[in-house]
Image: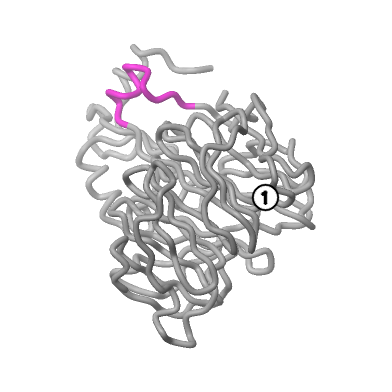
């Protein structure tokens, strides 16, 4: 049963040696209420920096609610993109323009009803949204930058004239606007002006890639699962791979996206059993199943307020929209 506002205001620190210390936050991963002193110690540990923290103020106000288990999201819409026979990647702007791409084909920007707003470059591999609601669209050698009206404003070479940086297989954008490309066992970072920032080899090919607010990179690969890497500004050593969801017979994660609360939505794609969308905390803690109402999920993206989830279903060749319960 959900706690009342009065209950939250009376919560005491779970871990504190001082029995009367009132809690100021709740850790959803540890399931602990913590006073400020204990929270300061909690967040100083590297392994706990990605834990989901809610303030008591937010719990009292109702801005944040807690649930014991993840409830399945409801499907509220579905559409096909005209002229697109095999959609694979997707990205959504803050004003609900939806970019959809088919591997090696066209990228199109559509409305929530599927009406075409803009047609972008051909020969695309993936796409992502810029901080000003434009789109980034890479092909085998270049990344094109489009404004919110679908006009190409610039492009830059992603291969960096080096053989070790290969075709882009996945991409995302961090909170500072840096563009993070997943390539063949390589992560490479560019600025949006096309200047190369850094790159390093990793142990797997990123079929999907996401970045947390603390600059942790998580990559998905059907064979290797979910793997988190330390901050690309401070280290390259991979952390412990995420454990598969319980009761999963075959775990084949393909694509993923990250919420503003650093929660990961992951597709268990073709060959997985059961196929569906699963949710993790960035710490690696499993949260629950979001939906199994997809047969062959590929690209995945969240709305700006994290209340809607857009999933490319390769089986139905359509985009399905799910709403948070």
Residue located at (40% from left, 41% from top): 149
Residue 305 drawn at (x, y percent): 42, 31
Nearer to me, 99 or 229:
99
Toward which corner of the image does residue 214 lie, by quadrant?
bottom left
Residue located at (40% from left, 35% from top): 94
> Mark 1: few, some, or many residues within 10 Å (few <14, many ≥20)?
many
> Magenta stretch: residue 60 in it?
yes
Q: Is residue 17 visible?
A: yes
| Side of 52 where 290 appears, left or right | right
How many numbered discs, if any? 1
The stretch in magenta equals: 55-66
| Side of 144 where 16 appears, left or right | left
Residue 11 drawn at (x, y percent): 32, 23
Farthest residue, direction left: 37
Q: Quadrant of the C terminus?
A: top right
Position of 245 relative to 195 (above/below): above
Tag 1 secondary structure: loop
- For the rendered model, the colour scheme is one colour
> Magenta stretch: residue 70 in it?
no
Nearer to me, 289 or 126:
126
Residue position marked by numbered label 1 in the rendering: 87
Position of 88 relative to 188 (above/below): above
Nearer to me, 248 or 274:
274
Toward which corner of the image does residue 220 lie, by quadrant?
bottom right
Position of 8 relative to 117 (above/below): above
Q: Is residue 265 visible?
A: no
């Amino acid at each position: 049963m959900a706690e009342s506002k009065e209950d939250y205001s009376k919560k005491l620190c779970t871990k504190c040696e001082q029995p009367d210390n009132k809690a100021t936050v709740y850790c959803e991963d540890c399931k602990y209420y913590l006073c400020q002193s204990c929270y300061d110690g909690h967040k100083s540990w590297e392994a706990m920096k990605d834990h989901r923290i809610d303030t008591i103020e937010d719990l009292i106000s109702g801005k944040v609610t807690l649930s014991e288990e993840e409830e399945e999201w409801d499907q509220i819409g579905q559409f096909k993109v005209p002229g697109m026979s095999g959609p694979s990647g997707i990205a959504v702007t803050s004003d609900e323009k939806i970019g959809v791409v088919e591997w090696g084909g066209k990228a199109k920007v559509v409305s929530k009803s599927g009406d075409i707003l803009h047609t972008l470059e051909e020969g695309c591999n993936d796409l992502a949204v810029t901080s000003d609601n434009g789109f980034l669209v890479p092909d085998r050698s270049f990344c094109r930058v489009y404004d919110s009206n679908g006009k190409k404003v610039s492009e830059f070479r992603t291969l960096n004239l080096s053989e070790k940086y290969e075709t882009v297989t996945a991409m995302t954008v961090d909170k500072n606007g840096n563009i993070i490309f997943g390539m063949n066992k390589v992560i490479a970072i560019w600025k949006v002006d096309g200047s190369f920032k850094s790159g390093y080899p990793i142990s797997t090919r990123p079929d999907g890639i996401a970045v947390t607010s603390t600059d942790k990179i998580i990559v998905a690969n059907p064979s290797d699962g979910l793997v988190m890497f330390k901050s690309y500004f401070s280290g390259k050593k991979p952390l412990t791979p995420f454990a598969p969801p319980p009761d999963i017979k075959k775990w084949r994660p393909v694509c993923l996206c990250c919420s503003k609360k650093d929660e990961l939505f992951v597709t268990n794609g073709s060959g997985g059993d059961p196929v569906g969308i699963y949710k993790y905390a960035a710490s690696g803690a499993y949260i629950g199943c979001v939906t199994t109402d997809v047969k062959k999920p590929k690209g995945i993206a969240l709305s700006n307020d994290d209340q809607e989830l857009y999933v490319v279903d390769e089986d139905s060749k359509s985009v399905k929209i799910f709403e948070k319960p």
